[in-house]
Amino acid sequence: MISFASARVLVVGDVMLDRYWFGEVARISPEAPVPVVRVTRRDERLGGAANVAHNLASLGAPVSLVGVVGNDEPGATVEAMARAAGIDCRLTRDPAMPTIIKLRVIGRQQQLLRIDFEEPPGPVALERKLDGVAAAIAQARVLVLSDYGKGGLAQIDRLIAMARERALPIIADPKGDDYARYRGVTLLTPNRAELREVVGGWSDEADLHRRAQALRESLDIAYLLLTRSEEGMTLFSAAGAVHVPAQAREVFDVSGAGDTVVAVLAAMTALGRPMDEAMRLANRAGGIVVGKLGTASVTPAELFGETA
């Protein structure tokens, strides 16, 4: 079993609170053709960048979390949950924005509806966030940029510059179609839909490899890891491409699986392990977490408890 006790990681990005309302569906509403859910249980979990940090803490890696939340009850909940998980929490409170919340309504173990509450952070809060980064980055071995497109990484160029000044590896989980903003990171981790949005559709595997390598080279990125759901993962680098098939597990919920993958990649990178080895372990972790409901994490016992 690998120990992550010295794998100190700094996570910066869009911090969220994931809320789940579970209930029973017994009838259709007379007001509209929609199911009526009688809520019987509620749950709250760390989401977005906070879920990446939670996964790192679950692995036993020392982790700092920097981001912006609202000056509200959900923001206080996020901070309390993060600290309880052992995360070094350096959150900036922005009174002008609500904490980002993803509310999922679950009936009969099936997600029926998701409601998002979000506003981008203001410039003052974003500047104060950089102070948190400056205070934590000196101890970090890896910087993770967890981008959900919510505005928390508006100064991403400055964050990348701060890490490169210290020769820190940078792992970016991207969002949107402007990948130029990730120029100079060490590892980029798009999924199929995200990569297709940037490079267009590919006709076959050879075409995919050409497009992925061209993107990687144009952005001065050492590694591009394409997560491909049931098709596994492919790692592109100057040395070529390495592919691993997906773990043969029943898929229950893919929410947050990308966060788990990024966390394992970051922890392994912080230990100086080879990227292809990191990918194989991250692939295994992703296969475990999709078998759980909602945003979830993996423990070392789960990750190393079976024959890999």
Image (tube, helix red, strand yellow):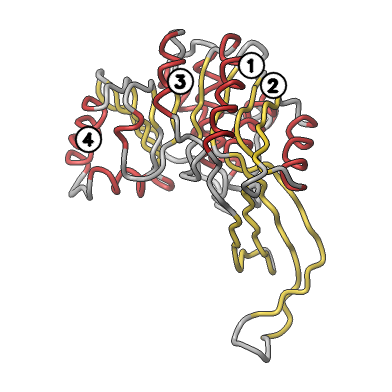
Which mark sits nearer the N-terminus, 3 or 1?
1
- How far is disc 3 from disc 1 in space, using C-alphas? 15 Å
Query: Please, what secondary structure does the residue beneath circle 2 have?
Result: loop
Circle 1: is it few (<14), some (14-19), or many (20+) Cα within 10 Å? many
Task: Give the quadrant of residue 257.
Answer: top right
Can you give x and y, in whole percent of width and height, for residue 239 in the image? 25, 18
- Vertical order, 148 against 60 (above or below): below
Residue on which the image places disc 1: 4
Residue on which the image places disc 4: 209
Front-most of residues 172 and 122: 122
Front-most of residues 39 and 292: 39
The residue that appears at 65% across and 22% down in the rendered structure is 63
- How far is disc 1 from disc 4 in space, using C-alphas? 32 Å
The residue that appears at 64% across and 16% down in the rendered structure is 4
- How far is disc 4 from disc 3 in space, using C-alphas? 20 Å
Task: Give the quadrant of residue 199.
Answer: top left
Which mark sits nearer the N-terminus, 2 or 1?
1
Residue on which the image places disc 3: 277
Residue on which the image places disc 2: 60
Give yes or no for contact between labels 1 and 4 (Cβ–Cβ under 8 Å).
no
Give yes or no for contact between labels 2 and 1 (Cβ–Cβ under 8 Å).
yes
Say which amino acid is labelled 1: Phe
Which mark sits nearer the N-terminus, 4 or 3?
4
Circle 4: is it few (<14), some (14-19), or many (20+) Cα within 10 Å? some
Q: Quadrant of the C terminus?
A: top right
Give yes or no for contact between labels 2 and 4 (Cβ–Cβ under 8 Å).
no
Say which amino acid is labelled 3: Glu
Can you give x and y, in whole percent of width and height, for residue 196 in the image? 29, 47
Which mark sits nearer the N-terminus, 1 or 4?
1
Which mark sits nearer the N-terminus, 2 or 4?
2
